[in-house]
Amino acid sequence: MDETLPGKSETLDSPPGCQLDHLLKFLAQEWMSHIVWALGRNTTMRFGALRRALPGPISARVLSARLKELETNGFVVRRDIGALPLHVEYSLTEQGGRLDALLSRSETPAQDLNLIQIKNS
Amino acid sequence: MDETLPGKSETLDSPPGCQLDHLLKFLAQEWMSHIVWALGRNTTMRFGALRRALPGPISARVLSARLKELETNGFVVRRDIGALPLHVEYSLTEQGGRLDALLSRSETPAQDLNLIQIKNS
DNA sequence: CAGGATCCGCCTCGATACTG
DNA sequence: CAGTATCGAGGCGGATCCTG
């Protein structure tokens, strides 16, 4: 069909625009960056432990959702150590480790990134 | 007071947690990354031109809000070439340029960042 | 313990109308 | 042209209840 009209396809997106926008939105979801960061410091964590490791009260519903997204995108592995009481362990994949490097370190060309403080209003 | 109880202060935030979270949320706001990216390619743009340069229909209300946030945080300069019809020009500051570098380039340790495709569901 | 199902309030954004 | 004011819809996440 006619593909000259812009601003319609948003998933198969248009000509110009920031490519990292999707990743940005992905990481900026509530708790997402904290989850990656926490997993980056612990090689492996159980659901409850991870939950408690986060800076503030996260609902199980959201933590579960985030972990599923991370798994879907290959950043996290979920290992079900069956049995009862239930025992599940999460850990970063190599890809996930790369994400963590981004969030934890600042040895990039934009190393002053950490210094950037965003004002709320 | 007692500051041993966690999960209360969110702006003056708690012990552990990803430091870049605020910046992430800032950049992930609707249109934000695209705006920075567009300004990064044009040294200076008028309100309307910028608006049209974005990949999709952005409301004036939101564009205005974003630009104000960018200005507040020192990423953008606003120059009011008074007169009528109104004429205003926006451009990136040096700080803003650094942001643009992040969004445009991928010569960082995580250069494969651009390759990361996020699945919606 | 590790989640799924529901309900529900808030916040964000888009659309529209108006102004200097 | 470059915005501001208002209204309304949608989604995102929190709280609560329930299960294997």
Image (cartoon, coloured by chain):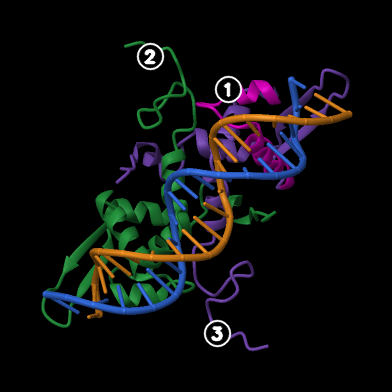
Chain colours: A purple, B green, C blue, D orange
Task: Identify the secondary structure beneath mark 3.
Answer: loop
Q: Is residue A20 visible?
A: no
User: Are the numbered discs 2 and 1 placed on the same chain, yes or no?
Assistant: no
Quarter assignment of residue B12: top left
Q: Which residue is mark 3?
A: A5
Q: Is residue A15 left or right of residue B67?
A: right
Task: Identify the secondary structure beneath mark 1.
Answer: helix
Residue numbers of the magenta segment: A47-72
**Residue A17, x across and y down, in percent:** 49, 67
In magenta segment, residue A69: yes
**Residue A55, x across and y down, in percent:** 50, 26
Give yes or no for contact between labels 2 and 1 (Cβ–Cβ under 8 Å): no
Residue type for callout 3: Leu
SS majority, magenta? helix
Residue at 42% x, 70% y is: B58
How far apart are labels 2 and 1 at the CA level? 17 Å
Up-down relation of residue A4 to residue B47 (above or below): below
Residue type for callout 1: Ala
